[in-house]
Amino acid sequence: MKSYIISNSKSNPFLKTLYLRIFLFFLLIQIRSCFSSSPAPFILPLKTQILRSPSKLQFQHNVSLIVSLTVGTPPQNVSMVLDTGSELSWVHCNQTTRNNQPDPTIFNPNQSTSYKPIPCFSPTCVNKTQDFPIPPSCDSDNLCHATLSYADASSSDGNLASDTFHLGSSGNISGLVFGCMDSIFSSNADEDSKTTGLMGMNRGSLSFVSQMGFPKFSYCISGSDFSGLLLLGDSNVTWLTPLNYTPLVQISRPLPYFDRVAYTVQLQGIKVSGKLLPIPKSVLVPDHTGAGQTMVDSGTQFTFLLGPVYNILRREFLNQTAGVLRVLDDPNFVFQGAMDLCYRVPLGKTRLPNLPSVSLVFTGAEMVVSGDRVLYRVPGETRGNDSVWCLSFGNSDLLGVEAYVIGHHHQQNMWMEFDLEKSRIGLAQVRCDLARQRFGVGL
């Protein structure tokens, strides 16, 4: 029909020009949609696991969010910690076998025909690693060598490489750059075998989500069985509660204590049972060095506040739980080196009393921490016939960290959306176990 109209418009130059412009307009829309279309969304199950994983904070053991997938050709099984606070994804590599059998917990690059090391003078090594905390170097084979170090004195190093990542039945991603770490050090050699890989999900150019080109990703962690899901791409679900969005804070100039590729939001205040605490606004914004940013970090378990703010929260929570909870009177006990407000709860008690809620107030959104999530039972710690529970907020000053860190313990039963395209984070309370069922994950 279109060709008929255009052919019959020869007698009318105006109509010919009009139809031609309409034709070109729709053609341009089609071309743009082809080039701007995002990858189809992927859904992966999440699980929690207590292990020794490299931590930005000084933790010996941490509950981490684990994603399982396969890498290489033919595929090899790997497990990776989901970490929105890191850029480079990496796996534990070893080019040898044990008793002539491959180690199922370690990736062997020699067994993958699609594995390709990255030369140190390549554009990837030179131009896309500028946000690495430690700049990469050249090894003796002129390959791009990366070193990662953590606050708990653990470290890992190895070469950058690319390979094919298989996301279950969702599809394959070829040529994804990651770290093949063949040297991993920790202060506890017995725990080295438990070290898993890491899926870097921050806004850096070499993060997993940036390389895949997704405009957004989401995750949801159940508060009951501690399982969850990771959604790469747009959810496009009608049943999801409308999200409240808070914009990402971005500072273009480099500052010594500001992570420019982290998911930084603006913490406006803190409430305890609806009471807004008297916190000066000046301590909630980054200073001239970048210290004091607020980062949403799925690779950290708990939430940590700078000393002055933590002390204000500690005092108010202590006041509101007076006569309700029995304080642990042990000044020498500080859980995880940063959590010093702890309580004694009888071992036979199946439920905690009603606890004050703690709300983190951001620009445009609020994260409410209530119920058992406000406290955390310390594994294996008892006093007589009592278990030990600690306030699940810690003092980051005691860890030498110049930032506020929002950990995944307080993101349970929250739909967390990281919108890279619009530079914002969306959140809403939701039953994450039901969300898994809706998506058919883990069934």
Image (cartoon, grey):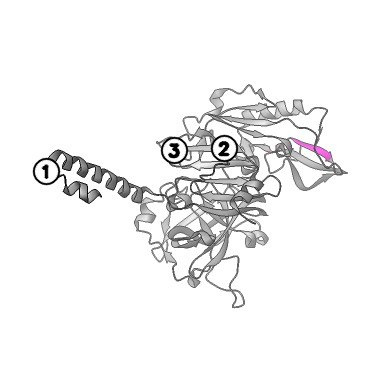
What element does badge 1 sit on? loop
Give percent across and percent down for residue 248.
48, 35
Label 3 SS: loop
Q: Amino acid at mark 3?
A: Lys
Find residue 427 and name its label.
Answer: 2
Disc 2 crowd rating (10 Å Cα; few below 14, some 14-19, many 20+) is many
**2 or 1: tag closer to the N-terminus:** 1
Q: Position of residue 164 (x, y in %)?
A: 46, 63
Camera-side residue of 236 and 331: 236
Q: CA distance from mark 2 to mark 1?
A: 60 Å
Percent coordinates x, y for residue 60 in the rendering: 67, 51
For label 1, count other residues whose C-alpha is less than 10 Å away and answer few (under 14), some (14-19) or many (20+).
few
State the residue lying farthest toward the bottom. 100
Is residue 107 visible from the viewing direction of this image?
Answer: no
Q: Nearer the viewer, mark 2 or mark 1?
A: 1
Left or right: 216 as drawn, with respect to 351: left
For marks 3 and 2, the one nearer the N-term is 3
Which residue carries the number 1 mark? 11
State the separation of the CA atoms marked 3 and 1.
49 Å
Q: Is residue 271 magenta?
A: no
Q: Position of residue 341 (x, y in %)?
A: 73, 35
Q: Which residue range is magenta in the image?
A: 338-345
Q: Which label number is shown at residue 422?
A: 3
**Along the viewing direction, whichever of 434 and 165 lies nearer the viewer:** 434
Whichever of callouts 3 and 1 sits on the residue coming sooner in the sequence is: 1
